[in-house]
Amino acid sequence: MAHKYNLVPQDVPKVQTKYRSIVTQLPVPESLAVFERLSAHEPISMSGQPPVIWDRAEGINIYDRWGNKWLDWSSCVLIANAGHGRPEICAALKAAIDKPLLATYVFPHEGRAELCRMLAETAPAGMDKVFLLSAGTEATENAIKLARTYGVRKYGPKKHVIVSFSGGFHGRTLGAQMIGGMSGQKEWIVQLPGGFVHIPFPDGFINEDISFDGFLKVLEENGLTADDVAGVITEAYQGIGPNFLPDEYARRLGQWCKGNDVVLIMDEVQAGFGRTGKFFCWEHYDLVPDLICCGKGISSSLPISAVIGRNDIMDMYAPGSMTSTHSASPLPVAAAIANLKILLEEKLTEQAAQLGVVLGRGLDEIQARYPSHVGRSLHRGLVGGLLMVKPGSKDPDAVTALAINEKCMQKGLLMFAPVGLGGGCIKIAPPLITPKEALEEGLAVLREAFAEVLG
């Protein structure tokens, strides 16, 4: 379902608090010319977000140029973990520009060595190698390439199958959408190749079977055994929820992969860098991955991604045969180094864990008040979601989700468009630097929006 926000300016109540300021009609009448230019020159696919023209973003706030200020619950789709426009990141970028050093291809520079070391130190022992890229979808594509290469080179062509999960999202490039678990995103592919198997994700809601036996059953139904499987990839939490792996399922998945020499890939593109109250979300589970895909929160700003992996897997390709034009580009690298220092020095992972109690309690209270409309309250650390359903069913209620999202925007609380299968999940992802009082104010706004939309 396409998200359609109202582009007719409306009179909305004025807001003036420490964290929010709404002083005009929304959308701002003067902003409509910008939307018209975008409509004329961009594909319609780019028009799915709330109608706010960002002028600047600092800390936990988004500003337009007409005097409005929003409390941010989007983090630029889970990018700005350390907050927007951090002075330390801006200073690092200015230093690189003033050098100047703007592009290097894969010629070495000191920042590249420093960032690879810092990322390797976040991973388990034996995962000392880091491949830097530009986008999360590149990271997941490279991870499945590495997993399949490992299986085929070590055991022969039989061990080439990649297993992933229904509802999963791993990017928008061809390989990433083949392993992705959303059927609507595969229509353009027409003919899917063999070697890819999807397992129902054990979310406990749509799929009520959360036993690992279901995983093994699907393999058996497809005529496969562990000898056929090169790799398993799963988001550390599925972004459409957020849906987290059940603990026992995760434990058995990790054991099965280790016992059968199957490469376990944890996609941490949106889950990593402190978001869930652990540095990586997989640390909540009793397993150890072989490859970790990173992106988004790695820099809190510029485009950069990474695969962190087991040394023997990462070193399979000869010099020059696994590279990328903008791998370790100096500006994103400078931003990422500064960002990692902030995350560690300010203990933002620990802060996310503490604030997660506040966010979780607030979301659970909303679900308890509207049980026929909110199918699930999902949260861990500073990521959460309220799954809106049509009363009496598990069918997503995209209309109500969008109405609540739009109402929040009008009150000075900004989230990205509702997500998930059918667009029924109101997803919440504040920067990790959000003060407790700001988080509580945001929850109060969310409660107001629910009351006004649902009564």
Image (tube, rainbow, N blue to C red):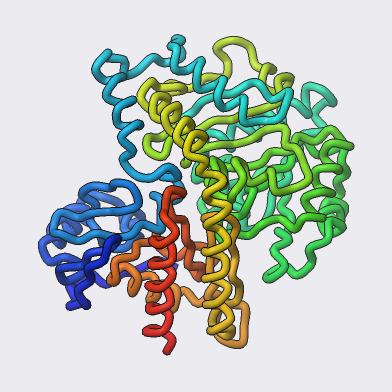
Q: Is residue 109 above or below residue 171?
A: above
- Of 12 and 10, the residue lying toward us: 12
Task: Tell me what residue is drawn at x 47 percent, y 41 percent.
Answer: 296
In the picture, measured across the screen, residue 304 lies left or right of residue 357, that is: left
Residue 383 visible at all: yes
Q: Splitting the image into 4 quarters, where does residue 162 fall?
A: top right
Q: Is residue 419 above or below residue 219?
A: below
In the picture, measured across the screen, residue 391 lies left or right of residue 95, that is: right
Image quadrant for the C terminus? bottom left
- The total of numbered circles placed on residues is 0
- Of 306 and 13, the residue lying toward us: 13
Task: Tell me what residue is drawn at x 84 percent, y 36 percent.
Answer: 258
Task: Tell me what residue is drawn at x 40 percent, y 75 percent.
Answer: 404
Image quadrant for the N terminus? bottom left
Estimate the x, y position of residue 107 in percent, counting from the top left: 44, 10
Estimate the x, y position of residue 137 in percent, counting from the top left: 52, 39
Estimate the x, y position of residue 47 in percent, counting from the top left: 31, 58
Question: Most extreme residue toward the bottom, as rendered?
Answer: 455
Residue 135 visible at all: no
- Of 245 and 172, the residue lying toward us: 245
Question: Most extreme residue toward the left, as rendered?
Answer: 30
Task: Tell me what residue is drawn at x 12 percent, y 66 percent.
Answer: 29
Q: Splitting the image into 4 quarters, where does residue 50 fall?
A: bottom left
In the picture, measured across the screen, residue 388 lies left or right of residue 93, that is: right
Estimate the x, y position of residue 141 in percent, counting from the top left: 58, 35
Q: Is residue 6 above or below residue 351?
A: below
